[in-house]
Structures are given as C-alpha cells and as structure tokens.
Amino acid sequence: MENIRLLWENTGIYNATGSQVAMMAVGFLLLYLAIKKGFEPLLLLPIGFGAVLSNIPAAGMIDEGGILYYMYYGIKAGVFPLLIFMGVGAMTDFGPMLANPKTLFLGAAAQFGIFATLFGALALNAVPGMQFSLREAAAIAIIGGADGPTAIYVASKLAPELLGAIAVAAYSYMALVPLIQPPIMRALTSEAERRIEMQQLRSVGKTEKIVFPLMLLVLTAFLLPSAAPLVGMFCLGNLMNASGVVDRLSKTAQNEMINIVTIFLGLSVGSKLSAEAFLKVQTLGILGLGAIAFAIGTASGVIMAKIMNRFSSTPINPLIGAAGVSAVPMAARVANKIGLESNPHNFLLMHAMGPNVAGVIGSAVAAGVLLSLVR
C-alpha cells in the first residue's frame, strides 16, 4: 500500500494545479493554430509544444537538470535570436531596397509603433494590476516591429520574465498580418491611391549588394554599437549570399542552421510559458499593447508613403508603406494583394520588398536604441 501511495503521489494527476492545466490548454491552442490554421507554424508549433512540456506536473523540465532549463541558455545568452538573424540575412535580397533607396524612410516610419507603444505601456501603470517598469515597457514595445527574433532578443536582455508573453504576442500578430493590415491600409488610402502603378525597378549589380551590408555594418559600429550584434549577424548572412563565393555556407544558414535553431528557439520560448509566469493580468496588457503597436506601425508606414508620394517625382503607391513592418515577406504580399484588388495590372510585390527589408534593419536599429537608452 505504501508503494501504491508513493506511486499515486508522483502522478501528474496528484501534482497538477488548475493553472498548469490551463497553460497546457494554451499550449494545445498554439498547436491548433499552427497545424490547423497555419499561423506561423515554424515557431508556434515548437512554442506550443514547449508550453505543454513546461507545465507537465512534477516533470521538472524547466527546473535545473531539465532539458528546457539548459536549452533556455541559448536565449539568455542571445545566441538563438542572433543565429536566426544570420539565417534571415542569408535569405534577404537588398536589391529592391537599393533600387529605390527612398523605401528606407518607409521602413523607418513603420518603427514609430515601437516608440509610441513604449509610452503606452508606461501609461498602463495607471490601471490597477498593470505595473510595467521602463525596461519591461521597452521590451513590450519592440513587438511593434513585427520581428520575432528581435523581440525575443530585446526581451531576453530587458525583461526575461515577460519573454513568453512577448514572444507569443509577436509571432501571433506576425501570423495575423493578412487580417490586421488590410482594414488599416484601406482606411488610410483612397481607391485612386491604391491604383497607383509604380515604375519598374532598376537592376542592382552584384557590387552594390556586396558593398551595402559592409557599409551598414560600419555605420552601425560607429553610430549605434548596441545594435551591432543584430545588424552584424544579419549583414554576415546577407554577405555570404551576395558574394556568391560561399554557397555552401549560405545554403546552410538558410536551411539546416536556421531550421535547427528555430526548433531550439521555439522550445526555449515555450519553457517560459509556465503557469506562474504567464497567467497574470500583465499578459493581457502585453497582448493588447502588441496589437496597438502593430497597428500604429502599419499606419505610420502608409502615412509616410502618402507624404512621400506628394513630393516624389515618381509615383509611390501608399500601400507599400504597410510593408515597412518586418514581417518578411508576408507584409509585402499583403500590399501586393490589396493593390491587385484595385488594379489588376498593379504588381507591387517587388516594390513592397524594399520597405519590408528596410523594416528588418529598422527594427534592429530600434532595438539598439532601446538597449542603449534603457538600462
């Protein structure tokens, strides 16, 4: 009977708490969204599974000695997000942005949502139960960049206790780009503006593509060193691709490496979705602020494109401004889709890739600014 009692006391049923069961349900919900709905499955699937594993009663996976405990060191040290950035850089083509450098302003404008949300998070301190420090507010604000690795990197440095909620919010809103952005884009543009056809982009030479990441790295090193880890790894990945002399390394960064790191990153983020860390009133504030940040970033990009169109000698379709958020390439595809609805001959995809790539750079720079200012 004593052995039976000990066996019973070591079962998950005996040790389970209501909050753990609730968080396991959240994990299964993320798995459902990834598998059934196709919402960012590459990240939401391992994150959801990690959430289930981290809340299994008495399993100890997130305690010292557990696999998720040690796996999280990759995020804590900033290694996983930086390796993801290298892979993204290897998959990125700076050509559309270099062909139309004005799109850099659109990528920069879309980051306005980050800084607007910083003040919004601090304003929420007036709400009972919502208490965010400046470091936590800065970590939440980066969701507006729609760049998952950057959000995780900043959260791991400034507010690791909020990492799970911030990562889930960032990737959830990235997955919802086709639903969130179109109403904002239609509300801020007229039918005539959406019909604007842009001139064909010029061809960008190999030399330009090689020189640009090197110039970007040098500028970052001298002007904003705190952004150097993100920008540096991004530039390294891009240079491997643009140079054409290390195809094996480039393909590895684009495929095997980024896939392996994505698994580890997702499970590590999921390990922070434990009941005690996630089931707080603050989580609702983070999810709400993330949506606001994303909406403001989208709107800022569209408005900047409208302003630029008034003063530009060549036409600029304001829809491409929405691609200034860093959700590559989904935001560019959405801009192209909305443009085709108004004008079947209006192909905006390559034009939208310019601000889309600029948005990746912009979010990394914004992260560097936050890391420099918030200590």
Image (cartoon, rainbow, N blue to C red):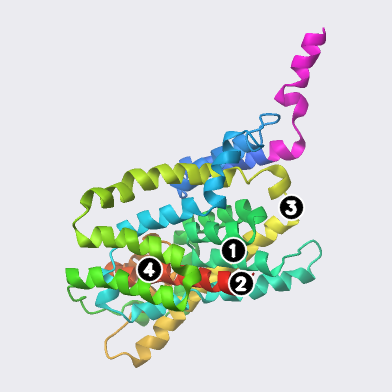
The residue identified by callout 2 is 117
Q: Which mark is residue 356?
A: 4
Q: Which of marks 2 and 4 is nearer the N terminus?
A: 2
Query: Is label 2 in contact with label 1 (beta carbons under 8 Å)?
Result: yes
The residue identified by callout 1 is 290
Q: Which of marks 1 and 3 is nearer the N terminus?
A: 3
The x, y position of residue 272, in whole percent, is 63, 46
Pick the residue in front: 158 or 310.
158
Residue type marked 4:
Asn
Q: What separation in Å lies between label 1 and label 3 (alpha carbons)?
A: 16 Å
Residue type marked 3:
Lys
Q: Earlier in the sequence, mark 4 or mark 1?
A: 1
Point 78% across, 67% down: residue: 127
Q: Quadrant of residue 91?
A: bottom left
The residue identified by callout 3 is 280
Segment tinted magenta in the rendering: 1-22
Q: What separation in Å lies between label 4 and label 1 (alpha carbons)?
A: 19 Å
